[in-house]
Image: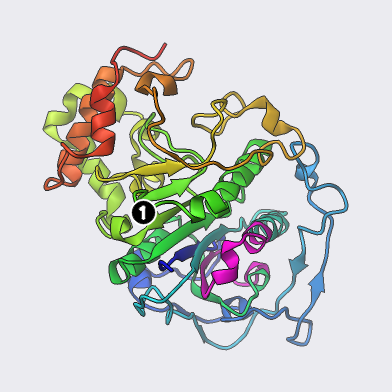
Amino acid sequence: MEAFVLVACLGVLASSTTVPSPESQIQSSVVRKGSPNSLMRKSVPISADGHAQVQASAGPSFLQGWGSLGPSSTAGTLISTRAGSSTTTSALASSATNPTSTDSLTVFYHVFQSDASGGEALSASIVREQVLEATSSVAFGTVQRLNYVFVGPDNSGIPALINCSTCQQLEHRAAGGEVITLQHVFDHCSKNPAGRVLYMHSKGSFHNTPENMVFRRFITKGAWSDACQTMPQACSACASRFSPLPHHHYPGNVWLARCDYVSRLIPPVQMEAAMERVANASAAAQWSDILGKEDFVGRGRFSSEHWLTSHPSLVPCEVYARTDYQWGESTAQIPQSWKASGGSTDWTPTLQTFPRTGTQLSGFCQPGVGLDLDKVKTLRTFEWQQLYPTADLQSSPLSIFYNASAGGKCS
């Protein structure tokens, strides 16, 4: 069986603890004082005297409607932990640092918890929902290691929800973005080129909206589906949906990928700066109207979503066969049918290699976007030449797609 790796990072905001630089944390184990058992390799709930204390709660009110879990759901299980524990070291003796060719499935999961009121309850509901989706899949039966990174308060009970015999925390930070976990993905793949990785994150834990809730369920389902898990060798990566506009990306940034492809990419911690160099190059002035919009080119915080698909050798695969969704997460961009109970998960994953027959770049235009497709096509070539100057664009599936597509403007 081909090796498979899933990457998990838990992200939680805000803490008074001093945070080391990203570079130092990515390269070494994190040692923190005052952390609760959220830094355990295998989580155990904690009571008032230092032991377990688990309290089930009803699902948050925001889950009502929009395909909610229902008022009787205990997806928001909360676990209180006692702060003030002794110095603890996170478990970095994972597949990310110990290369093996026999890992069948390793998980890397990014979860964020806000320090605002209700932040823990919200993140708890999301974690339980996503863990249930994962553990209900056929692929989870082959999991050898589930790695996660937790970003947030020291006294949070969220890490205790990631409680399984194969669960292992990689890092705990007070604040940070997805790039932290994506770097672990890259490091692992660099040492395990024959493996595969599945990356997911707790979408909606930062922006708690009904749209993010249904969208999270949509993207999580695709990555864990049998269709993605059994993708043919030709596929570099797989997710619910791939889109070449406004920049090439997997909307929502939850995906499965082959390590031999991932290892060709720019390290995630360098991606944002690399995209800034592309945008600020003197020769890029002709695309200034596009480059000025970060979400149109994968700059700034959008560079993490752009990272996986940034290499021209990518052969993207997807499993959402319908045409009612292309990209985006706003109310206007997601199908109205998703807002019904179970709407964003009421579909059968079917593997498709991009582009589907007859697909044109213009087919991804959306009202009000106003993109000049001729400029988009030439900008993509320029970007690849800047990011990966030795890559072969003539054999690039995406380059061939762009060149074969008609130009014009998105109305």
Extent of the magenta region: 131-159
Which one is nearer the viewer's eye here, 339 or 401? Answer: 401
The question of residue 124 being in magenta is answered with no
Quarter placement of the N terminus: bottom left
Q: Position of residue 180 (x, y in %)?
A: 41, 61
**248 in relation to 185, above or below:** above
Q: How is the image coloured?
A: rainbow
Q: Is residue 268 left or right of residue 348?
A: left
Classify mark 1: helix, strand or loop.
loop
Q: Quadrant of residue 297?
A: top left
Q: Amino acid at mark 1?
A: Gln
Q: Is residue 305 left or right of residue 276?
A: right
How many marks the image carries: the answer is 1
Q: Position of residue 227 (x, y in %)?
A: 53, 49
Q: Position of residue 107 (x, y in %)?
A: 51, 66
Residue farthest right in this picture: 72
The question of residue 137 being in magenta is answered with yes
Say which residue appears at 65% left-offset and 72% top-offset: 155
**171 in relation to 218, above or below:** below
Say which residue appears at 29% left-offset and 21% top-offset: 405
Quarter placement of the C terminus: top left
Q: Position of residue 220 (x, y in %)?
A: 58, 50
Say which residue appears at 55% left-offset and 65% top-offset: 15
Q: Is residue 156 left or right of residue 172?
A: right
Note whether residue 153 is visible: no
Q: Which residue is mark 1?
A: 233
Q: Quadrant of residue 279?
A: top left
Which one is nearer the viewer's eye here, 358 or 206? Answer: 358
Note whether residue 160 is visible: yes
Mark 1 crowd level (few <14, some 14–19, many ≥20, 10 Å Cα): few
